[in-house]
Image (spheres, grey):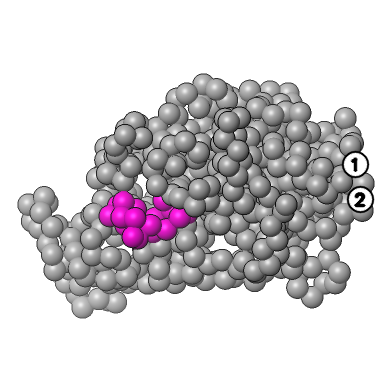
Amino acid sequence: MVSWNTSLLWVFSVHIFTSCKFVEGLKDLPSHARGGKIYKEIYGSLYRQSEAPQTYTQNEALSWPAKVDNFDDRNNNTFQQRYFVDESFYNGKGPVFFEIGGEGTLSGPPGGYIAKLAEKYNALLVALEHRFYGESIPMNSVDTETYYKYLTVDQALKDLDSFTHWYSKQRGLLEETKWFVFGGSYPGALSSWYRNQYPQSSVGSLSSSGVVNCIVDYYQFDEQVTAAVGNQCSDRISQIQKSFEQLILKENRQEVNEEGWKIALDMFNCEYDMWKEDFYYMIADSWSMADQYANKESLCNTILNIATDDATGSNRDYNMVLMQTFANYTNDLWGTDFCTGGFYNSEQLRDPKRWKVDPRSWRWQTCSEVSYFNTAPKRGSLRSMDVNLEYHLKQCNYIFGGKYYQGFPTSYALNKKFGAGQPTAHKVFYSDFSDDPWQRASVNYKVSSDQPYRLAMGDGLGHCQDFHEPSEKDPQVLTDLREEFETYLDLWLNE
């Protein structure tokens, strides 16, 4: 039987680096970054609350009995995996627009651009929460043994396939009903891999900012941030990073200055047991995500508008103004619990009494399989050089090390299986955006004739930009990208 959970799910807590009331443009926003103004502004702008009858207010969470282990016929255990449906535009004959949930809590059906498409195509909107995120927790456990067996890409892909067949039967869909898949960021990669692994279950997919290339030492992420924000802003970010290092470390650059360390942590409301590398990773995420989510202008304006006379004259005082200004910006943009949201602190990620489901689950996926470790480039790095591959692997082993964690992600095997930057799927449209630092983990431009690729070049175009609800203010290049995608959507739906 289907479990009907009637609670409304306007979730602003737990996580990375994704999820939302599946409102496009928020679906990839980390749940530990949903307490600030960027979430609230986008959240408020993407709902058409006053337009009846086509409002996006169908937020009742449904669930289906998903298998705990999709590949063991002897294991009949199930868990309640949540999904959302919006029938506002469905006429009983249209396609299903199926959105893949990612590494965060799912809190509603597809919105934004996908909902606009549903209106045009009379489509049924469906979104499925990823296993081990939100409330879809097999065995009600997030310990390493459970992860090892059941939190894998293969299990997640099979969930999509099994759900498609279960829901089609449960809903009584016409046999000829076609499913078209949407995913952004990690779900964008899943949307390609799903087309590879289960091509018979859908007719095509849109992979927006899809990170199909699982790069272990992903220093290119920072290189793209540097290129996007420009030299002047990059120099100021580097100055902020160095100011924190001077505050935190003693003159020998090896030992921590406890007084300065506490000052730095208090600026961001961080716990006192963080590693300094965790802290450096956190502040780098703040400025990188500002670029990623199309807020580089506000970031650069804020940190470049600090005049020398804003401080009292000494170099130390000026550095304090820089750091506090950046901290205030971070707390305002991402929320005052950005540092304490369970994503950065290695001690918290290890301690069962302090676990938060979404960040711990994503950390397992990066440590065990997909990687994408954001590391410092050897030259011109914005983040601390201490945030390197050695740090990430050390953290993985500290959190999960033991019987079930093998010490290194299986990214190379995943890339070999699905083609990495040259995916071996069919009927997938890939979209990327010039300011997005994740674009360098996407496809390598031209893929194949039935896997078209479009990189939208323009100032301020960030992660999954096409998933936002279309606006008259959109740059022409974004409009052109959507129009090109829709030619393939028409083609693949009608074949």
| Left or right, 485 with reference to 20 | right
- Please name whichever residue, 390 or 343, is drawn nearer the observer in this view of the structure: 343
Magenta span contains residue 320:
no
Crowd band around label 2 with a 10 angstrom C-alpha radius: few (<14), some (14–19), many (20+) = some
Q: Give the range drawn in magenta.
A: 342-360
Regarding residue 486, the answer to whether it shows in the image is no
Magenta span contains residue 348:
yes
Q: Which amino acid does label 2 sit on?
A: Gly
Q: Mark 1 points at which residue?
A: 174
Q: Which residue is drawn at 83% across and 38% down?
A: 178
For label 1, the SS is loop
In the displayed structure, would residue 148 be above or below residue 92? above
Numbered badge on residue 92 = 2
Q: How many marks?
A: 2
Q: Which of marks 2 and 1 is nearer the N terminus?
A: 2
Could you tell me residue 411's position as x and y percent? 45, 29
Q: What residue type is labelled 1?
A: Leu
Answer with the quarter of the image where residue 200 lies.
top right
- Please name whichever residue, 470 or 108, is drawn nearer the observer in this view of the structure: 108
In the displayed structure, would residue 231 be above or below residue 162? below
Q: In which quarter of the image is the C terminus?
A: top right
For label 2, the SS is loop
Crowd band around label 1 with a 10 angstrom C-alpha radius: few (<14), some (14–19), many (20+) = few
Answer with the quarter of the image where residue 365 lies.
top left
Q: Which residue is drawn at 30% across and 66% down?
A: 270
